[in-house]
């Protein structure tokens, strides 16, 4: 019971870590086709996509992406309230996104293949040869 | 429509954020607070208005502490000190106090252990409660139990015999009332009590040691600059 709980915790931690790891690239991906303003980005990633538990935690990430030169921002007036900060990909950001995209697809393919194998490909072969 | 109690909620939230961000460089702190404030305004101005109003918006934002953590600055003074494995001095003395403090320095020694137990950040409240209740006095409890059982034994295990004189003549009848508890049962109970009295504090101490040695969960580390480390490293 204790071991099981510890393992569940470890699994949850891993998923949380993976989410945190891909989050910057998800931000970049959302900016690939069009620029978006802060609230829009944050609300999508947090509530629509459920990638973070607190939407507020994305703002420091946006600030970091800005400092690293991967996104650029501009202020636009909006009719319905205060000026909005719009984010768009910089060329460096586009490169980073492309590179991540390749690595991710390659990793995903490998892991998927291993997981599918588990369903009775490899293991099934072993069983067949024994039984 | 924003009511004044909504304003209160927001003001308190922003105050907490300001407090939590006190370790950040001033310009970043100001920027973060401004962005969060704008976020709240945007969210409340959105069509349709969020169900649950300001409370929902703040809920979705997450706690101010969480937000500041993700900015990569540790919260001042709240991280437990020390590495995960070594027991701190507080923990060691607490456990010793709980176990043998009652014997070495009756009452006071054990109480000292309890105080240190509750001060230490290493244990959850449930474990602290367990260690306080099992058993008060630590290993002094079995000693007390032994004495109490010993005293009780004379009343319960032996037969009580009395001599009565019958009315006529010099006859003496001795009447023995059987012990209220059969000896075998009394001895069994005594053994059970003693074992529990001794095992209780010892098992609890073992649990405390193991819990304290588990790697202390550090506050969420700041994401390393993932975008500047090579992806294929």
Image: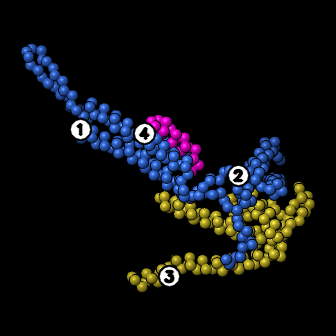
Chain colours: A yellow, B blue
Task: State the CA–CA distance, disc 3 to disc 1.
Answer: 66 Å
Residue range in magenta is B104-123
Residue in the foreground of this view, choosing between A96 and A80: A96
Closer to the camera: disc 4 or disc 1?
4
Secondary structure state at the residue bearing disc 4: helix
Q: In this view, does A65 lie above or below B146?
A: below
State the CA–CA distance, disc 3 to disc 4: 63 Å
Give whichever of discs 4 and 1 has the lower sequence position: 4
Say above or below: A13 vs B41: below
Asked whether the residues under marks 2 and 1 belong to the same chain, the reply is yes
Tell me if residue B63 can be seen. Answer: no
Q: Mark 2 points at which residue?
A: B76
Element assignment for label 1? helix
Callout 2–callout 1 Cβ contact below 8 Å: no
Q: Mark 4 points at which residue?
A: B103
Q: Which of marks 4 and 2 is in front?
A: 4
Q: Is-magenta flag for residue B112? A: yes
Dot 3 crowding, Cα within 10 Å, few <14, some 14–19, many 20+: few
Q: Mark 1 points at which residue?
A: B183
For the residues labelled 4 and 2, the Cα–Cα distance comes to 40 Å
Nearest the viewer among B57 and B195 is B195
Q: Name the residue under label 3.
A: A122
Q: Mark 4–mark 1 contact, CB under 8 Å?
A: no
- Asked if labels 4 and 3 touch by Cβ distance under 8 angstroms, the answer is no
Label 1 neighbour load within 10 Å: few <14, some 14-19, many 20+:
some
Report how far apart the C-alphas of labels 2 and 1 lie in the structure: 63 Å
Q: Tell me where residue A41 appears, x and y as whole percent.
A: 78, 64
Label 3 in the same subunit as label 4: no
Of all chains, the one bearing label 1 is B
Distance of label 4 from label 1 (alpha carbons): 30 Å
Residue ID at (52%, 59%): A5
């Amino acid at each position: 019971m204790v071991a099981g709980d510890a393992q569940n915790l470890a699994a949850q931690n891993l998923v949380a870590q993976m989410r945190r790891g891909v989050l910057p690239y998800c931000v970049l991906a959302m900016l690939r086709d069009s620029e978006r303003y802060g609230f829009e980005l944050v609300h999508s990633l947090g509530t629509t996509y459920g990638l973070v538990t607190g939407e507020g935690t994305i703002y420091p990430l946006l600030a970091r992406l800005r400092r690293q030169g991967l996104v650029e921002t501009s202020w636009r007036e909006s009719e319905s309230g205060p000026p909005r900060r719009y984010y768009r990909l910089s060329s460096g950001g586009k490169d980073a996104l492309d590179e991540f995209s390749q690595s991710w697809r390659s990793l995903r393919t490998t892991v998927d293949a291993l997981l599918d194998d588990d369903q009775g490909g490899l293991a099934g072969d072993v069983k067949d040869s024994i039984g | 429509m924003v009511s004044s109690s909504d304003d209160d909620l927001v003001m308190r939230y922003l105050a907490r954020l300001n407090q939590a961000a006190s370790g950040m460089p001033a310009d970043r702190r100001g920027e973060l607070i401004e962005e969060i404030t704008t976020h709240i305004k945007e969210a409340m101005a959105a069509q349709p208005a969020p169900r649950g109003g300001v409370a929902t918006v703040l809920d979705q934002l997450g706690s101010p502490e969480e937000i500041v953590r993700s900015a990569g600055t540790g919260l001042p003074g709240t991280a437990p000190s020390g590495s995960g494995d070594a027991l701190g001095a507080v923990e060691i003395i607490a456990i010793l106090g709980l176990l043998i403090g009652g014997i070495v320095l009756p009452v006071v020694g054990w109480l000292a252990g309890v105080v240190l137990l509750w001060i230490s950040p290493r244990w959850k409240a449930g474990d602290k409660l367990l260690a306080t209740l099992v058993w008060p006095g630590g290993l002094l409890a079995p000693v007390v139990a032994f004495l109490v059982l010993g005293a009780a034994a004379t009343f319960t295990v032996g037969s009580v015999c009395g001599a009565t004189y019958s009315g006529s003549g010099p006859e003496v009848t001795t009447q023995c009332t059987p012990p209220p508890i059969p000896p075998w049962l009394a001895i069994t109970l005594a053994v059970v009590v003693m074992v529990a009295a001794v095992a209780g504090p010892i098992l609890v101490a073992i649990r405390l040691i193991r819990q304290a040695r588990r790697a202390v969960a550090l506050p969420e580390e700041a994401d390393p600059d993932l975008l500047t480390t090579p992806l294929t490293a």
